[in-house]
Structures are given as structure tokens and as C-alpha cells.
Image (cartoon, rainbow, N blue to C red):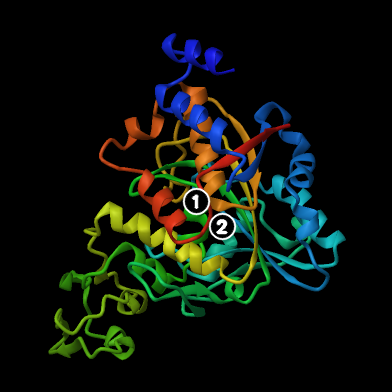
Amino acid sequence: MYLTLFFMSINGFLPRLIFYRILFYSFHMKSNSSKVHFLPWNKKNNLSVLLKAGGLPELFDKNESVAIKAHFGEKGNKGHVNPKYFLPIIKMALKAKTHPFLTDTNTIYHGARNNAASHLEIAAMHGFSTDRLGVPIIIADGDYGHSYKEIKIDGRHFQKVKIGQAIARSDMIIAVSHFKGHLLAGFGGAIKNLGMGCGSRVGKFEMHSSVSPSVNLRYCTGCGACVTVCSQGALKVVGDKIVLDAKKCAGCGECILACSQQVLGIKWSEPGKNVQEKFAEYAKGAVRGKKIFCVTFVNHITANCDCVSFDETPLMSDVGILASKDPVAIDQAAFDSVLKKAGYDVFRKAHPNIDYNVQLVHAEKMGLGTRRYELVQL
């Protein structure tokens, strides 16, 4: 096998990175590794086979609350996982007499998914509805992102993380992720879906920025809505405009959520390394004390995430679907499968200044999972 891999590598059919990774894992996968099951894209209609092979049915316990973490897709974007692929998961959960629900959290930017009402409208527009899927659709952090539970972790950046209430109160999380590129993380998969995806709006601000918000007084009416929610006393109204005391600001983002005039915004200055580590720490908080199962769709692989409000041309052809109980292993396996099929590093080419390994390394360090995996092909 090793000789075959060597000739594949030197002849250009297998990237050198993948060659060394496979060689290394061939010796070490049996020790302290996680199983990742793989279903080629041409067998995508056999999703139930993948779920059973991955051990999903055995995880269910009667009457437990099961949060099926989805991304309902931004308006105009077609990269999100098609709702039809959620049906086999839902069917298994209902058969086990659990209480499944589909869920996501509100976004921090001003768009169609930054409040529960319009978020649910977009979800229904994209086929995510109770009538079609047979389970409730719940925005985990409430109407405007204020419903969350603080979960204690021992992270480099956070000691507590703010997870959407409905997800935090569940007994089990099934993370259904779309593997694609990402502007800040290089790529986004299960770790990002669990971290950024399960964080409340306030939590999303914590991940994206640790500095005081930007202020555009041109739109300010002096209504004082931001002042009333500032727990630090960093804001006040002087005349008919707000004044921000940056020294008092905690960077929580509550004022940005409260402002309907877009006077306050994010300073997108958080170093990419820190953002990726924060994703991983929030993911750790999201799954703490819960059973976890991950299903990752490696198709429609674009340079940017599904939050962009337009449909991108895929960077390459579709690969397949992965399943695992380990979010770190499944991200590593998804990444390796993309490089193997493309024959080059598509994410490095799309985002040359991003070291996407940071999220994997930090997630493993946080105890979220392992990068070592045994791939089981179906």
C-alpha cells in the first residue's frame, strides 16, 4: 500500500500533504483515533446507510431533547444543506421516541436572519418548515438573540460561553454541516457550525471582536436604546447624539443589537488566529455534557460560507457525505477528502493568508476531539 501511495504522490495524483498524512495515520490510526464514515456523493441517496453505520440510532434515548443544528441559508445563497437530507435523521429520531427540533441562531449582521421572525421566514422559503419536515423549527437564541445560557469552559479566550438557550437545554446535538471555504477560518465545517452556529448573537460578537464598536453618528437619532442595555455605563446621550467611552466598553455587542439605525457596528479587526480559536472554544461549550453526532456534506464547495447573500460557483466537483461522533476528526477528514479529490489546496488558494489549521489544533487541545481518524468507506 505504501509503495502505491508513493508512486501516486510523485506522479502528481495525490498531493504531498495528503500522502504524508495517510502514511502517518496508517501507522497510528488504530491508537486514539476516531472513526469517520464516508459516503461518496454518487451514493447520496443512501444517507440512512451512512447514519446507521456511524452509530446514530444507538445514541438516542427515549424522551430526550435532540437539537438538529442546521444552517437555513442566507437569502440568495444555495450552498446550505438541502432540507430533504434532514428527513432520514428526523425519521430515526422520531422512531426512537425522542423530541427532535431543527435549530439555528440569529446572525450579528443586519440581514434577513438577524431576528427570529425573518429568520424563520427565510427558513420556510428554503424548505425548512414544520409542515414539510414534521418537527419544530426553533431559533435557539430567541427573538433578537438575547436568550442564551452561559456554559463554563476552561479556554484560552473564554471562561464562559453564551450558547443559544434551546441548544444549551438539549440533551443531544446533531450537527449537520456544509463544508466550504470561510473568509476568517479558511474553511468552515462542524467546528464552525457548533461554535459560531450555536453561539447567541452576543456570543457571536465575542468571537468576532474584542474591541469597542465603531460609531457612525450620521444615522444617530439620540433615541437612547443603546444606553439602556449598556451594563458598563460606556454610552450616554449628549444633545441628540450618543457618546461612547471606549475605556468602559466591555465589547459585548449588546448596544449593536439594540440599535435599529445601524449607528453601531463591528470593527472587523480580530486576528484570524484568535477568531478560529474562539470558534473552537464555543464549540466546546455547545457540546459540553451532551451526546454529539456530526454529518458533514462535502458538496457545492465554495470559497465563502453560506452567509453570503449570493450563490457562488463551486471551486470543484462534489465529494461526498461524512458521519462521525467526533467534530474534529470529521473536519480533518472532510478537509483531506477535498484536497485528495481536487489535487491541490483549494482553500489555501481561495484564502492565502489564512492558516486554517488553527481551528483544528485548538479544538483538539480543548478536548473537543482528535485529528486522528480511521476512514470507513461505504
Q: Which amino acid does label 1 sit on?
A: Lys
Mark closest to the chain's N terminus, 2 or 1: 1
Measured along the vertical axis of the image, is residue 26 above or below residue 221? above
Residue 113: tell me if it is visible: no
User: For this rendering, which residue is in front, 253 or 284?
Assistant: 284
Q: What residue type is labelled 2?
A: Ile
Residue 15, located in which quarter of the rendered image?
A: top left
Position in image of residue 161 (x %, y %): 44, 73
SS for callout 1: loop
How would you rate the neighbour count of disc 1 (Cα within 10 Å): few for under 14, some for 14-19, many for 20 or more? many
Measured along the vertical axis of the image, is residue 246 above or below residue 184? below
Q: How many numbered discs?
A: 2
Q: Is residue 324 left or right of residue 43?
A: left
Measured along the vertical axis of the image, is residue 295 above or below residue 171? above
Distance Cα–Cα, label 2 vs label 1: 7 Å
Q: Are marks 2 and 1 in contact (CB under 8 Å)?
A: yes
Residue of label 2 = 122
Q: In this view, does 113 lie to the left or right of 83?
A: left
How would you rate the neighbour count of disc 2 (Cα within 10 Å): few for under 14, some for 14-19, many for 20 or more? many
Q: Is residue 302 left or right of residue 260?
A: right
Position in image of residue 129 (x %, y %): 69, 59
Measured along the vertical axis of the image, is residue 335 above or below residue 370? above
Q: Is residue 163 left or right of residue 37?
A: left
Q: Mark number for residue 75? A: 1
SS for callout 2: helix
Question: Which residue: 54% across, 63% down?
Answer: 119
User: For this rendering, which residue is in front, 178 or 115?
Assistant: 178
Question: Which residue: 62% across, 77% down?
Answer: 169
Residue 134, located in which quarter of the rendered image?
A: bottom right
In the picture, which quadrant includes the N terminus?
top right
Question: Which residue: 58% across, 41% down?
Answer: 373
